Every structure is written in C-alpha cells, then in structure tokens.
Image (spheres, grey):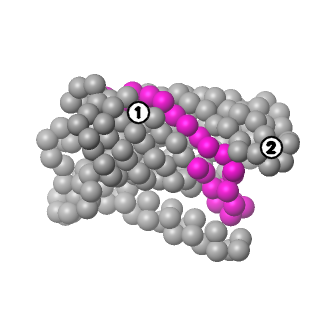
Amino acid sequence: MKYIKTLVGALLATALLVTVATAAPSTNAPIVKSKGYLDKWTLSLAGGGSTALGGDAEKVGSAVGGEFQLGLPGHFVLPLEAGIRQGVSYNDVNSSTWLLSTKVYSDWTVVKFGNLQFDAGGNVGISYGNTSPTWTIAPEVVSRLYLKKDVDVFTRVEYPFDLNEGKSLNRLTYTFGIRLGF
C-alpha cells in the first residue's frame, strides 16, 4: 500500500509540474491562452495555519505563518492560475520549529457565481528550516470573493501528503489572504 501511495503521489506531482510548465506563456503553446484581465500576473499575501487531525499525541500540534505567492492566470481546458509560493511558519509539534516552504501550484476555476469563485487544484514542494527537509504534495480547494475586477480575498484549505514516507500528514492547512492583479 505504501508503494501505491508513493506512486499516486509521484503521478500527481508530475501532472502538476507538467501543468505549471504548460501554463507558462509561449508562442508555441496555442492551447494555453490568456484573455482580458488574465494577461496580468497576480501577487498574493496571506497568513494561515495548520492543525493536526488527531493520531499520535506527540504529533498533535499547530502551526501559524505567512505566505507570498506569485502566479500567472491562463486557460487550459478550464481557467487556471499557476505559480510559486514561498512561506514561513512556526510549528509547535514535538518542539518549537521554524519552517520555510517553497511550492509550485496550479488551481483550476471550477465554479463562478457573480463575485464568488471556487477553485480546485494542488501543489507540490519542499518544507525546510531547522528540521529535516520534507517533500509534500497536496490537493487544495480555494474560495475567492472578488472586491474589484483584479482584487480578491480568498481562503484555501489543503490536505498534504509526505512524499518522503508516502503517507498522509493527517492535518489540514488553511490560508486566508488577498490577491492583486498587476
């Protein structure tokens, strides 16, 4: 079962990286196109945390932190945004730990009702700091409320998997922030 989870995680990571590479602007990629305000880059500033869902008493804890995100909207079957995130957080699991994370992500717009939008996608990246590096992959859902054409506030929830060990981290990571188009 461990190898199946690792294989599924590797396939999801590959699909995510291919999507991010495909979403890059190129004159040789006619399928990926921007339209309207989507020609702009996006910059997001966010804060959030992570809470364990239970399990071993020594692994139950929380984390809080902040995040910077740079993305480029486009269109590949559905409207999407792909980019990179850099985060810093403080974690109190086992002992006090400062963590940094660098992730690539891709989120597809699934439903849009007026100023409210729901996205689904995923991310893959590495967490590091004063602990051993951990590669993770996570499915995520995002809800956005547009305040203006190129400004929205959002919430994101993700459920990460540890690619080093091929298992779930059994926690939810949540983020609240603002995104600007420029």
Q: Which residues are magenta?
A: 159-180
Q: Residue at x 64, y 37 (%)?
A: 50
User: Quarter-wise, where is residue 62 in the image?
Assistant: top right
User: Quarter-wise, where is residue 32 in the image?
Assistant: bottom left
User: On the picture, is 182 further left or further right than 43?
Assistant: left
Say which mark, if any, is on residue 120.
none
Q: Which residue is mark 2?
A: 59
Q: Nearer the viewer, residue 162 or 100?
A: 162
Q: Earlier in the sequence, mark 2 or mark 1?
A: 2
Count of numbered labels shown in the rendering? 2
Q: Residue at x 60, y 28 (%)?
A: 65
Residue 69, image x, y percentages: 43, 36
Residue 182, image x, y percentages: 25, 30
Q: Residue pushed farthest left?
A: 36
Magenta run includes residue 173: yes
167 to 44, vertically: above or below: below
User: On the picture, is 44 further left or further right than 158?
Assistant: left
Q: Which residue is mark 1?
A: 154
Gap between marks 2 and 1 measured at Cα: 29 Å
Residue 157, image x, y percentages: 52, 42
User: Quarter-wise, where is residue 93 in the image?
Assistant: top right
Q: Nearer the viewer, residue 12 or 109?
A: 109
Q: Specify the amino acid type for callout 2.
A: Lys
User: On the picture, is 56 further left or further right than 99?
Assistant: right
